[in-house]
Image (cartoon, rainbow, N blue to C red):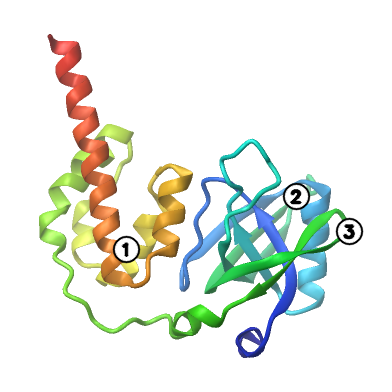
Amino acid sequence: MIKKFLEKEEVLPVFPLSGTLLLPGGYLPLNIFEPRYMNMVDDALKADRVIGMVQPCAKKDKGELYKTGCLGRITSFHETEDNRYLVTLTGTTRFDIIKEAKPKNGYRMMRITTACYTHDIQHEEQPVDINWGCILAKLESYFAMKGIDCDMTILEHTPKAKLLSVLSMVCPFEASEKQALLEAENCKERFDLFTKIIDIATQCSQDEKKKVEH
C-alpha cells in the first residue's frame, strides 16, 4: 500500500491540526468528534486507511497549511458510545503538498508527493552518534518546568532513534518548532534541533526565575 504513494503523486485526505506532530514510525492517538473528520476516517477505512497529518500555518490566512506533513495509517480504531472515534495513526513517510484538490465529504484533499522521503519508509535509520548523556539533565529540568512526570531511567534504556521520535512528538513545543523537527533531514539533524529547543526553553525559564527573585 505505501509503495503506491512512492511511485507517483496521489490525492489523499489531510487532517490539519496545529501543535500535533507525527513522525515516521511514531504512533499518534486521535480523538475524532467533528462530523467532517469522522467522514474522513470512514472513507479512509474503506480505502487504504491512510490520512495525511499536517499543521496549519500560523498566518492570517487560517486555511494555509505547511508544505510538509506525514502520512499515517490507521492501525487502531474504536467507536465510543457517545459517537466519537478513537483512532491511532502509525507514521509511515513524510510528504510534500503540491496543491489542494476538490474537498470530499466536508474535509480537505491534497495532491501530494513522497518523492523526497523514500528513506522514511524503512523506519530504521542508520546508527548515528547521539550522546543523550549531555541532554538528560536538561530534559529533567525541562520536564520539571513543564510539570511533566517522567521516569528518567526509562529514557536511558530506550533506543535512541525511537526515543528522539517519541520526545519530539510528545513534548509541548511550539507548532513552528514541531514543524522544524518534522522537516529535519535526518536523525542527527533532528537531535541537534531538539537539543537547541530544550536549551532555549530551559534558559528562558531560568532567566524569568532570576527576574522574579530580583
User: Which comes sooner in the sequence, label 1 or label 2?
Assistant: 2
Q: Residue at x 76, y 70 (%)?
A: 44
The image shows residue 204 at horizontal and vertical percentages of: 23, 30
The image shows residue 142 at horizontal and vertical percentages of: 25, 40
Residues packed near mark 3 inside 10 Å, few (<14), some (14 to 19) or many (20 plus): few
- Left or right: residue 88 versus residue 167 is right
**Callout 3 amino acid:** Asn
Q: CA distance from mark 1 to mark 2?
A: 34 Å
Q: Residue at x 18, y 25 (%)?
A: 207
Q: CA distance from mark 3 to mark 1?
A: 36 Å
- Left or right: residue 125 versus residue 140 is right
Q: Nearer the viewer, residue 101 or 202?
A: 101
The image shows residue 33 at horizontal and vertical percentages of: 75, 47
* Mark in front: 1 vs 2: 1
Among the 4 quarters of the image, the one containing residue 119: bottom left
Q: Quick check: 100 above or below 18?
A: below
Q: Which mark is residue 206?
A: none
Q: Which residue is mark 1?
A: 190
Q: Quick check: 88 above or below 82?
A: below
Residues packed near mark 2 inside 10 Å, few (<14), some (14 to 19) or many (20 plus): some
Whether the residues at callouts 2 and 3 have beta carbons within 8 Å, the answer is: no
Q: Which residue is mark 3?
A: 105
Q: Which mark is residue 84?
A: 2
Q: Quadrant of the N terminus?
A: bottom right
Whether the residues at callouts 3 and 1 have beta carbons within 8 Å, the answer is: no
User: Which comes sooner in the sequence, label 3 or label 1?
Assistant: 3
